[in-house]
């Protein structure tokens, strides 16, 4: 039963914090010593503030950000979540014409450790180069 509760906790964090932008929920769902080992701001800020800053930055860049949980498994205190993120970023128009936007989709895997009913550590893997190429910020390799 505990594994199901842990999986539900991580899914709740995705839905409430990432998809709805309810950042205050991080104070309840994330431990005061939470660390994101390889996310946007790895190890620089800890605790709920780390996730709040990360989410705020992504939601500023992609106002319509939506993360879909594709699969979630839990084993003891570890939850592994496979996800797909979709979002549209406003693009600066270099030619002086009408504003445009750039949309993209990427997939990734989130591994979290739960202790005391809160998320205490996370590791995320996603195709950064592919995302940058979709945004036109990096030429595709090939």
Image (spheres, rainbow, N blue to C red):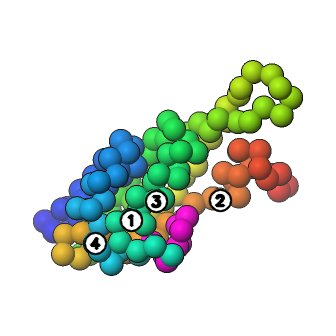
Which of the numbered marks, if any, corresponds to residue 49?
1
Q: Name the residue that disc number 4 marks.
A: 31
**Residue 74: image x %, image y %?**
29, 67
Q: Position of residue 82 (x, y in %)?
A: 44, 56
Q: Which tag is nearer the camera, tag 2 or tag 4?
A: 4
Q: How far is mark 3 from mark 4, CA to CA? A: 15 Å
**Residue at x 79%, y 53% (from the top left corner):** 138
Please give the name of the residue rendered at 23% of the width and 76% of the height, measured from the top-left corner: 115
Image spot of residue 47 (x, y percent): 35, 72
Q: Tell me what residue is drawn at x 83 percent, y 34 percent.
A: 94
Closer to the chain start, of discs 4 and 1, is 4
Q: Quadrant of the C terminus?
A: bottom right
- Residue that numbered label 2 is attached to: 128
Residue 62 seen in the figure: yes
Indicate the secondary structure of the residue bearing disc 4. strand
- Relative side of 12 to 107, left or right: left
Specify few, some or many for label 2: CA neighbours under 10 Å numbering under 14, 14-19, or 20 or more: few
Residue 59's disc is none
Residue at which label 3 appears: 53
Residue 17, given in percent of the width and then of the height, sits at 35, 50
Between marks 2 and 4, how big is the CA–CA gap? 27 Å
Q: Is 34 above or below relative to 53?
A: below
Is label 3 or label 4 in front? Answer: 3
Between disc 3 and disc 2, the foreground one is 3
**CB within 8 Å, label 1 to label 3:** yes
């Amino acid at each position: 039963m505990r594994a199901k509760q842990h999986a539900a906790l991580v899914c709740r964090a995705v839905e409430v914090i990432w998809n709805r932008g309810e950042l205050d929920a991080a104070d309840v769902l994330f431990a005061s010593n939470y660390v994101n080992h390889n996310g946007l701001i790895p190890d620089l800020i800890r605790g709920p503030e780390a996730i709040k800053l990360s989410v705020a930055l992504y939601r500023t860049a992609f106002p319509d950000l939506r993360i879909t949980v594709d699969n979630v498994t839990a084993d003891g205190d570890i939850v592994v979540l496979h996800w797909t993120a979709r979002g549209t970023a406003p693009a600066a128009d270099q030619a002086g014409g009408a504003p445009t936007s750039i949309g993209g989709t990427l997939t990734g895997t989130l591994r979290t450790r739960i202790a005391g009913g809160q998320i205490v550590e996370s590791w995320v893997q996603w195709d950064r180069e592919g995302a940058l190429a979709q945004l036109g910020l990096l030429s595709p390799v090939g």
